[in-house]
Image (spheres, grey):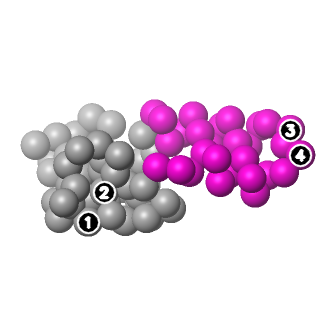
């Protein structure tokens, strides 16, 4: 309901980064990394699932699913 009516934090729409997404960006952006590509690869090990279809959207495709419809693929919900 709050997502559909764009209330509260959802007023920012799909561009909103959820807490764990925001923290990951801050950590990766402020860390002094010897190998940035390796660090990003480690950070994005979980695949996102769109809960509306139970389809995986890939390592970097989480933005394709609206925030309330995102889940980690390592949860026992996919077929």
- Element at label 4: loop
Q: On the rendered structure, is 25 left or right of 15? A: right
Percent across and percent down for residue 31 are 79, 36
N-terminal label among 4 and 1: 4
Tags 4 and 3 touching, CB below 8 Å = no
**Could you give the CA–CA distance between mark 1 and mark 2, rounded to whole angstroms?**
6 Å
Q: Residue furthest right?
A: 34
Instruction: Describe the element under mark 2 as helix, strand or loop.
Output: strand
Give the x, y percent position of residue 73. Answer: 34, 51
Distance (Cα) linking label 4 and label 1: 35 Å
Residue 55's label in the rendered image is: 1
* Residue depicted at x 84% and y 51%: 35
Q: Earlier in the sequence, mark 3 or mark 2?
A: 3
Name the N-terminal-most of marks 4 and 2: 4
Q: Residue at x 35, y 46 (%)?
A: 74
Give yes or no for residue 28 being in the magenta stretch: yes
Report which residue position mark 2 lands on: 49
Query: Disc 3 on helix, strand or loop?
Result: loop
- Foreground: disc 3 or disc 1: 1
Q: Distance from label 4 to label 2 (Cα)?
A: 31 Å
């Amino acid at each position: 309901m709050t997502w559909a009516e764009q209330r509260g934090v959802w007023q920012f729409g799909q561009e909103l980064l959820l807490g764990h997404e925001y923290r990951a960006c801050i950590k990766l952006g402020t860390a002094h990394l010897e190998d940035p590509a390796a660090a990003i690869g480690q950070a994005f090990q979980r695949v996102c699932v769109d809960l509306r279809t139970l389809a995986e959207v890939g390592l970097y495709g989480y933005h394709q699913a609206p925030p309330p419809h995102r889940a980690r693929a390592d949860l026992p919900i996919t077929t």
